[in-house]
Image (cartoon, grey):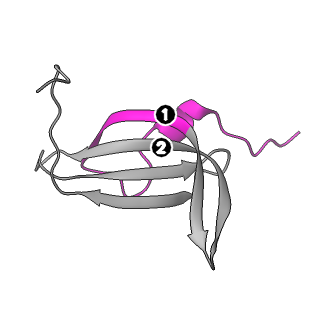
Amino acid sequence: SFSNTRSNDELIKRGVGEEGEECRAEMRGKIYAWQEGAWKDLGIAIIKVNERQEDATKGRLLARQEGSGKLILSAPLNVFEVTSDPRQ
């Protein structure tokens, strides 16, 4: 029988538009959007912080819906620094 489900591992892989980016962190979470005066539940998503390979000071926060992999959040991160010591 046909199955249209994908595993979380497949969703964490680079999707369309993520070429030239490196994933620095990922997690599973619930996404909400403020629409027409109320919070709308957009569902469970794989949330990632990606860094541009050619410019490590730029990146983006993105989320893909679990199951379909549809991009539901993409926000730029203009000051991007990864340190091994969180106190820095």
In this rendering, is residue 77 above or below 85? below
Q: Which amino acid type is marked by label 2?
A: Ile
Apparent side of residue 21 relative to residue 18 in the rendered image (left or right): left
Image-based side of 71 in relation to 30, left or right: left
Please state, as top left, top right, bottom left or bottom right, where the C terminus lies in the image: top left
Image position, residue 85 (x, y; %): 16, 19
Q: Does the magenta stretch include residue 16?
A: yes
Please give the name of the residue rendered at 64% of the width and 33% of the height, measured from the top-left corner. 7
| Residue beneath disc 1 | 27
Foreground: 49 or 19? 49
Q: Which span is picked out in magenta?
A: 1-28
Q: Measured along the vertical axis of the image, is residue 40 above or below residue 12? A: below
Q: In which quarter of the image is residue 33?
A: bottom right
Quarter of the rendering occupied by the N terminus: top right
In the depicted structure, whether residue 26 falls above or below residue 2 = above
Residue at mark 2: 47
Asked whether the beta carbons under mark 2 and mark 1 sit within 8 Å of each other, the answer is: yes
Q: Residues within 10 Å of mark 2 (few under 14, many from 20)?
A: many
What's the residue type where badge 1 is placed? Met
Q: In this view, does 69 lie to the left or right of 76?
A: right
